[in-house]
Image: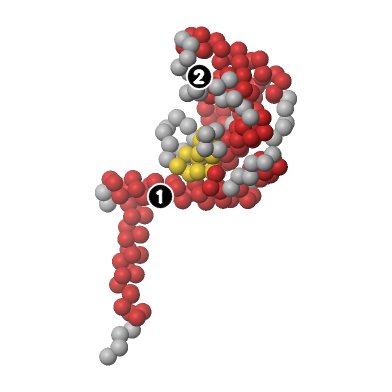
Amino acid sequence: MSSDPSSSSTPSSDTSTYERWRRRFSLITGLGGTKEERMTDMEEYHRQTCEKWKRELMNYSPAVVFMLKHLKLSGCDVSSADLICSPCDFTRSGGFSPEAGAVVLCQGKFFSKVHMEDTLVHELVHMYDHCKFKVDWYNLRHHACSEIRANSLSGDCRWSREVRRGFVAFSKQHQECVRRRAIISVRANPRVRMKPPRSELSTRFGTAVSMTLDHLMRSTRP
């Protein structure tokens, strides 16, 4: 007697469906499964969300499409493979690697797609500066220049984001945010932070940012 192929596959299909449901229930509630399974499932969920938002932003975000267009016009054609979703530490949501010529998007660190959009535009500004102007990332003024542009143009310093961070101001809020965040980023540059004494570097960070801030705040170059 011949067997029905569809009926023979039903138990396996049911088991697979049940397993997906069980792991999703465990992910949502934190109940059932092992800690390792829940961590693995959470990382996979964050990766899938990051990849989904990345595709949508590359196709439909006016700011991201604009940056990708001008990167291509500058000779740097950026593909999805150059925007990497990856786990990161808790101190950042993204980064640009000049050596790899790639942007890292820290999966699981975005509280919304708008947050991811701001981060992606910020890092694409760095990529554009690196491609167009051959930025020397060891040079404090070069790095400060790119950070000022990235913070000013990306949406990182919009009022609602500053309120979320606990900074509320009604006068020169944008300029102060750009300056503060640029100094933080330049201070974290691993290429320069270990050279002179820390006190000397702190002065140099602030000076490097201040010397370029006024001029670059008026810039709308991509």
User: Which amino acid does the dot numbered 1 rest on?
Assistant: Glu
Q: Which label sits in the foreground, 2 or 1?
A: 2
The answer to whether the residue labelled 2 contacts the one labelled 1, judged by CB atoms less than 8 Å apart, is no
**Quadrant (top left/top right/bottom left/bottom right) for the C terminus:** top right
Q: Is residue 165 above or below residue 32?
A: above
Judging by the rendered image, the residue that carries numbered circle 1 is 44
**Quadrant (top left/top right/bottom left/bottom right) for the N terminus:** bottom left
Q: Position of residue 191 (x, y in %)?
A: 50, 22
Which badge, 2 or 1, is on the more N-terminal residue? 1
Residue found 30% across the figure and 49% down from its top:
37
Residue in front for this viewpoint, 100 or 44: 100
Residue found 47% across the figure and 14% down from its top:
195
Q: Secondary structure at mark 1?
A: helix
Residue in front for this viewpoint, 177 or 81: 81
Q: Position of residue 207 (x, y in %)?
A: 60, 12
Q: Is residue 11 above or below residue 194?
A: below
Residue found 71% across the figure and 42% down from its top:
73
Q: Secondary structure at mark 2?
A: loop
User: Which amino acid does the dot numbered 2 rest on?
Assistant: Val
Residue 192 marker: 2
Determine crowd level at label 1: few under 14, some 14-19, many 20+ residues with C-alpha closer than 10 A: some
Q: Is residue 215 above or below residue 118?
A: above
Q: Is residue 151 above or below residue 68?
A: above
Residue found 33% across the figure and 79% down from its top:
7
Q: Position of residue 167 (x, y in %)?
A: 55, 23
Residue in front for this viewpoint, 185 or 133: 133
